[in-house]
Amino acid sequence: MNEAIAYLTSDVLSTDSIIRHGFFTRQGGVSTGIYASLNCGLGSGDAPDNVRQNRIRVAAALGVDMLAGVHQVHGRAVHVIRTREDAALRPQADGLVTGLPGIGLSVLSADCTPILFADRQEKIIGAAHAGWKGALFGAGEAVIDAMVEMGAQRNAIIAAIGPCISQAAYEVGADFEQNYLAQDPSGAAFFAKSASPGKRQFALAPYVAVRLERAGVAMVENLDVCTYADEARFFSFRRTTHRGESDYGRGVSVIALKP
């Protein structure tokens, strides 16, 4: 592959030299076929050596020692990393928090929202993966709570929501909306009529942003980039499903404290 590794950054997270972060695109890796090319999903059907090489490239691009990750399960558990031994573990969780420099907190996504967090003054960072389940049941809020327990100040935490599926591409059934609103009636503003009879369009990232704001953080930035629509740069589970493909690549988002 001759592509250069590429990633997006958040304006609110880029204002401090101690933080390194990136919402990585699918460009710049060694994987081929449906995984081309920067597939970082250890749980995908891609060749494990390719995935490992891609993750090495991501760590090198940010200048960090290692990438810490979790086995994502669409829940709200948080893996708190206090030692380098903790960073080598991969428990079932959808959030990570640390105050250790040089360790990249990584979450995978292919339409779900990747969220990166930082309290720059206390030097505590976090990352979360939130699809519709994680958003509803508070994956982002769980990371915020874990950061506060570690010493972060809630009203000093800034958050950035990376590329994910847009409302225009996220069609759901009416029963989905009803079940969602039964759990969180305030979510009604994030559903809109669809051109398809009996369907609705769900605004995942705006909903996540409001939930984070309610949790009391200082600032939330939504990059507002659609993974489904931008095939050249992003993997998409829904796009793969619509095509009947056998599997899909996973993009990675990473935040670290400068070594």
Image (cartoon, helix red, strand yellow):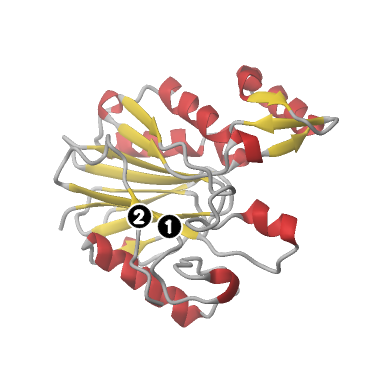
Residue 181 image-quadrant placement: top right
Compare marks 2 and 1 and give the one earlier in the sequence. 2
- Circle 1: element type: loop
Identified by mark 2, the residue type is Tyr
Q: Which residue is mark 2?
A: 7
| Residue 148 lies in quadrant | top left
| Gap between marks 2 and 1 measured at Cα | 5 Å
Q: Would you name the residue on which mark 1 appears? A: 25
How many neighbours does mark 2 have within 10 angstroms: few (below 14), some (14-19), or many (20 or more)?
some
* Residue at 49%, 76% in the rendered image: 31
x, y percentage for residue 21?
A: 29, 50
Count the marks: how many?
A: 2
Q: Is residue 239 left or right of residue 130?
A: right
> Secondary structure beneath disc 2?
strand
Say above or below: 24 vs 135. Answer: below
Q: Which mark is residue 41?
A: none
Query: Among all residues in the image, which is located at the extreme right?
Result: 197
Tell me the crowding category of disc 1: few under 14, some 14 to 19, or many 20 or more residues within 10 angstroms, Cα based. many
C-beta proximity under 8 Å, tags 2 and 1: yes
Along the line of sight, the residue nearer the viewer: 74 or 210: 210
Q: Quadrant of the N terminus?
A: bottom left
Side (left or right) of 211 relative to 146? right
At horizontal 46% and vertical 66% (from top left) the residue drawn is 40
Amino acid of disc 1: Thr
The image position of residue 100, as x and y in percent, is 22, 53
